[in-house]
Every structure is written in C-alpha cells, then in structure tokens.
Amino acid sequence: MTPHGTTTILADPHEIVNVAGMRGLEYMVAAAKNTALDIKYTMPSCVPAANPTLETSGAVITADEIKQSYDQGLTYGLAEFMNYPGVVNADDGVLDELLVSLNAHKMIDGHSPALHGQGLNAYAAAGVHNDHECTQVDEMLDRISRGMYVYLRYGTVSKNMPTLLKGVTPQNARFCCLCGDDLQSVTLRETGHLDESIRVAVQNGIDPLTAIQMATINTAQCTGLSDRGGIAPGLKADFLLVDDLEHFSVNQTFIDGQKIAANGAYLLTTDDSVAGFDDLLETVHLDNFSADQLKLKLTSDKAHVIGLQSISRTQNLVLPVTHDADGDFHYNPSEDIVKVAVIERHHLTGNVGVGLLSGFGLQNGAIATSIGHDSHNLVVVGTNDADMVVAIDALKTCQGGGVAVQNGQVIATLPFVIGGLMSTEPIDSLIAHQKAFNTICHEQLNVTAQFDPIMKLGAMPLDVIPNLRITDKGLVDVTKFEIIDINA
C-alpha cells in the first residue's frame, strides 16, 4: 500500500476474529508491528455477522470483548456494525456494544445496505458515523442528509464509486470519502489503492483537489484522526510526492517524515514472522465428509435459487428445477444452475446448508474455499456431488484456501493456511499463484469471466447483504433475516 501513497489504514479484522476470536485480533496487532504503515484496527462488532441462529461462527464477540480491546489499547473504534436490524429493533446485546463504544468515545463504522427512512434515522441516532454499502446515489444522499459520511467503495469486486460520484457536489463533497473494501493483493500490486480511486474519480469528472480531499482530510475528520489528513504545522508528516494531480502517479511516500517507499517499492526491510500463533495454522476442523450430506429434498418443480449479480448483492430467484425420485437436484448442462453448499468447519457440528446457485458459469467440476464471509465456513459449488466431496477433502488437507476439481482430480489449489484466510507466500508469488488458479477456473471450469472465483463464492454466506444467501444453517432471506425452505 505504501508505494501507492497510503500512510494510514483503519482495518477491520473481523475475518480472522470470526474464526479465532480475540486470538485472531492479537495476531493481527502483532503482525502490524512489522510495517511502517500505520494500521489502526477497529474492533469487530458483529461476530457472527448477524445472528447465531442463522450461521455458526468460530467465535462470538460481545460487549465484554469489545471493552477489553479498548482497555488493552488493541483497537481504535468499533468496526462496521452489520447487524443493522439489531440496531433498529433495539436488541439488548447490540445496544450494549454500541454503548460501550460511545462511553469510551470511540468511532463506530457503519454497514446499512438498502436501509432507509425511520430505520436509517434510528441507525444514525445510535451513533454510527458512516456507511460504505451505498450502491445508488439516493442511498448516498439519504445518509449525507442525516449527517453521516459515505465511503465510496472501489474494491476488487464491488466498484460502486463511479455510480456514486454522480451525486457528489461542491456542497456535499466534504462528507464523501474513498475506500477499498476487499481489495485482493493482485489489485493492490498492479492497480493501486486509494491512488487508483483518485484517478478513477478524476476520470469521472471530479476535480483533482476534491478527489484528494475525499481520500485524505475527509476520512481523517470522519474517523477522528485530527493529527493527520493534510499538510500543515502540527500535523503528522505523512505526505507523498506525485508527478501531477490528475494522473496521480506516486513517486515517493513519507510517514512521520521518513521516506518509506519510492518508485513503486517499499524501502524498509520487512520481517513477516509472527511467533507464538501456530494454532492459527490448523483451523479447518471437519469429520469425514460424504456425498450424502449434499443431498437436497426438492418437493416442487420450482426452487429458490441464489442469483449472482456483478455487484455485491444477490437475487432471490424462483426458477424451474429438475430432481430425481428422492428429491435431489439433477444438474442440466444447458442451464446455469449448480449446487452450492456451506459446511461448518469450527466446532464439528456437522451442519451443512445446501442450495442452488445461478450465474456462476461452472461446468463439469467443483470449486471450494475456506473463505466464506463472515463466519468463514467452507463453501463449495459443483455440478456433481463426487467432485464437491473431493474439493472439501482437499481443503481439509491443506487447511484452507481454494481448490478446483474436475473428474475426481484436484486441478488447482491456492493455500491460505493462516486461519484458512491468509497466505504465508511472498506477495509476488501469491499473485502468480492466484492468477494461475483463476485461469484454470475460467478456462477449464468455465466460471463466468468477470468473477474472481474465490471472492464470488466467499460472498455467498454473507447474510447481511441482500437478498438471498446460504450458510451452514440453510438458505437465508436477508430481507427477513430468517431461514427459508428451498422449495418455492
């Protein structure tokens, strides 16, 4: 990030905290000490993301752990509060978490997709500062009108910023900030971070100074980082040198007055080792898995099917399906509908949620990953149960990452051994490995070209973003926050 001009990030480690609880947070804090980048962690607020009745996480975070993180100086504020129904409905546990943060004078990050009207009023009144889930201009303006900041997202998958920029004016620009959100290493390395967001904003008609403002002082003011965000007496000497403001090619990056990066390279010696966390290398806990656990009980000729879209949200489609005499789904190569399942991997519960997915493009094979936002159970998609079982077994063997299978053979792996979420590979090696994995998924398994296979699959259990998701408990109607029957 520093070669691209980023000097400070506020990071939400809810991925590894969902897997390993406070132990995961402690690991991230220890790892952050190995870089000059100023990493301020926010305390994961929703672990699990919504409700334990909807999914099984590796850990549960309550107000007690949040207060502990503040008291120990581990976190800067409260991370995105995804359980917005809990806020609107005044859930006691939710209010406890908010009050602990407000009483400690901590910032509270938001997450409120499609929330509006009185619900949004209640959410903002609870002390939430911002939101990064806006996909349309009217959503952005709704939040700004209530005094909230809006993060315009430009990530590897979710690229809402160009649409939202149409609503940015000289009057409201001070409430607009730029952010990434789920940027893959290959995107950071080859495309950029906030520097790319600035370039895209300028290309979409935003004045360069306004775009820079949205990436610097606006965010500093939103998050309460009053010691940075501009170049002025008394502020931290965090700055960068660029050729020109429009193209925003970063030449040098300085943090606390020290040159940290130049000409696209990080200048300091790095030490990636973090001792004392070997337990995070074995987090995929699974008994013997069989094809019987993937069977569906279809009793209708129509089913609720997760419909993929290019944006982060999904559709709740009702589509005709065929099934055998026992009610199990019958795959038809001429139709883009495949089986998808989520397998609990933390507590050996044996929970398996099975559903159907449309729009992924997969043909003749299976893909599995241990990245399954936010509880990070195993997610597998396939055209046949046998390949799906092989993929799950391979994930257990490598303790996480991504696996592609065809005709009973593993044809590609991408190991993520730290919590089943992160790689120990050097970044350039990891990027090459990711590209090779994606190429196999696209060319041999026919996954839809614009989708990153793991990132797209990893979003399927995210039961706080509309509309239809799947967890280890089954199909989740996010608009109702309840498990529904697959039969329509």
Image (cartoon, rainbow, N blue to C red):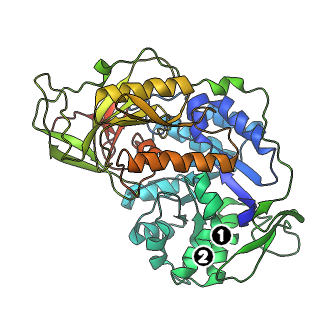
Task: Using the image, determine if residue 177 lies above or below residue 17.
Answer: below
Q: Which of 225 and 163 is in front in this view?
A: 163
The N terminus lies in quadrant: bottom right
Quadrant of residue 101 in the image? top right
Q: Of helix, strand and loop, which one carries label 2?
A: helix
Residue 88 visible in the displayed image: no
* Few, some or many residues within 10 Å of mark 2 (<14, 14–19, 20+): many
Residue at 55% from the left image edge and 52% from the top image edge: 182
* Image point (36%, 49%), residue name: 447
On screen, residue 65 above or below 3: above
Where is residue 63? Give x, y as percent: 60, 35
Circle on res. 199: 2
Considering every residue shown, the one lying at the far top of the view is 288
- The residue carrying mark 1 is 195
Q: Residue 328 location in percent, x, y?
A: 19, 27
Labelled pair 1, 2 in contact (Cβ < 8 Å):
yes
Q: Dot 1: what SS?
A: helix
Instruction: Say whether residue 426 is left or right of residue 144.
Output: right
- List x then y, in percent, for residue 79: 60, 47
Q: Is residue 152 visible?
A: yes
For the C terminus, which image quadrant? top left
